[in-house]
Amino acid sequence: MSRRSLLMSAAALAAAGPLATATAARAAARTPKVLVIGLDGALLNRIKDADAPHLDALMSAGLTSVSPLYADPMAPTLSGPGWSTIITGVWPDKHHVKDNAFTGNAFAQYPDFLTRIETAKPSLSTYAVASWNPVTDTIFSAKVDTRVSTPDAEYDTGTTSRAAAELAGGNRDAVFVHLDNVDHAGHSYGAASSQYLDAIHGVDTQVGQLVAAVRGRSTYGSEDWLIMVTADHGHTDAGGHGGSSAAERQTFLLASGGSITPGSTRYDIKMPDVAASALAHLGIAVNPAWGLDGRPLQQPTPDAFDALRPQLQTRADETGIGSAVVGFTHTPPAGWAVDNSAMGTGGVTEWRGWTFTTDEFWTSAERGQWRETNVRARNVFAVADGDEWVDKDYTGTFDSTLISPAWPVRGGRTATLAYTSHYRQEDPQKGEVLVSYDGGTPVTVRTYTADTVSKAESISLQVPAGVTTAQVRFRYTGGNNWFWVVDGVRITSG
């Protein structure tokens, strides 16, 4: 902040009176702290069905977000990959955990968020306790100040009592707690059982004990606690996980504290955001060189496609998608366009040309074909899916172009085109990225003719002299082949 801005802020506070000045000073002096609670195998929809007043209170006091997981071939929906993703802030294609053996993990390159805290701010105190030993023995490193693996005989009761004691009487800055009994009930009785609901009620009581320990601290009034509750995977009604069903892929985040709006719902949050949000709350800037997939929930990134959520419709021709699920539109956001002038006729209505959709809707069209590995797209994204389009009588080929607004650029300078891409190839399919300057002839800057699974793309553009705008086209051509997903498109000018 400039000196002039500081003076203006001080003048504004003085004009508002002593009470406003004192309140601002107290807020500035509050010490940030983080508590992350992991509920193994917990389903958000069953939490809402259960007697869970403490978790309900966290939802009312903060934000709620449902976040879908990956599935094979990226990784199965198991605890090893799930907790590794949450704790490191990167997806399995980076941390390399594919099962509960952790063989070949890349934790040295992508360490846990408590280790990053210790590296960036060694003076901060970190603590992790878990009912499932690999969390504290393997995922969190020895650099964490204290790691506790609860003996089996104590299980979640011991984990809760140890964590509550640290939260109430210690001076920890970042705490991670893993509770396991909901997952145990899921395996033993299934997620549709009364025993699963009973396990949620039990863990809700333990969450209440942890939150009460935080709020009962003698220093609580001078502290700013960010509390996040999440899960590593879901469960089937019959019990079990590891597959690609919506129930197994379901995770969630409940977060309260900091600057979070009470009672809010978000659709743009993903599992790796837990680690990034913890770091941001403690004043640790995420270094791009770390390669994190997570981004702080406190710093949402506006995306034009996400604004389409209120316009999403229920199914038209698809039969595998629930009749009440809203999830597609062909109407582009303001400034965008779709050119279907070369598109074939007929086919499945939902996927005729570029479509704007969600993970819940699109993956339900056909499971187990890599749609679930589209992890880096968020909320609403654009899909060209020739494979699904041909599932109803059609003529011609799939040929559709998604056209961006004209972004301002500086002639003679370098600009960067960034977007996330999820592309699965089968000949003669092709994906092309083209750029035109000041409405001129589009020039191809990238071509896709091989699998490119869930990748954050960055293309350097050499802007011609005298040019003031750049426009992007994503052209997908094919037929009974596969698909292409695009999201988060933007051009930044140097």
Image: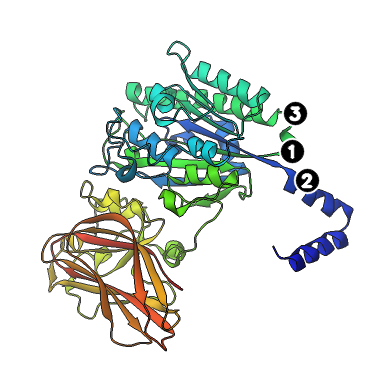
Q: Name the residue under label 2.
A: 26
At label 3, the amino acid type is Ser
- Neighbours of disc 2 within 10 Å: few (<14), some (14-19), many (20+): few
Instruction: Answer whether labels 2 and 1 touch (C-beta < 8 Å).
Output: yes
Residue drawn at 30 percent across, 39 percent down: 96
At label 1, the amino acid type is Ser
Residue drawn at 45 percent across, 21 percent down: 131
Q: Where is 333 relative to 42, above or below?
A: below
What colouring style does the render use?
Answer: rainbow
Residue drawn at 28 percent across, 86 percent down: 441
Q: Name the residue under label 1.
A: 222
Q: Where is 198 relative to 282, above or below?
A: above
Q: Where is 3 relative to 250, above or below?
A: below
Q: Mark 3 points at which residue?
A: 218
In the visual, does 453 lie left or right of 3?
A: left
Mark found first going from the N terminus, 2 or 1: 2
Where's residue 42, x and y in %? 42, 32
Q: Distance between the residues labelled 1 and 3?
A: 9 Å
At label 2, the amino acid type is Arg
Q: Distance between the residues labelled 3 and 2?
A: 16 Å
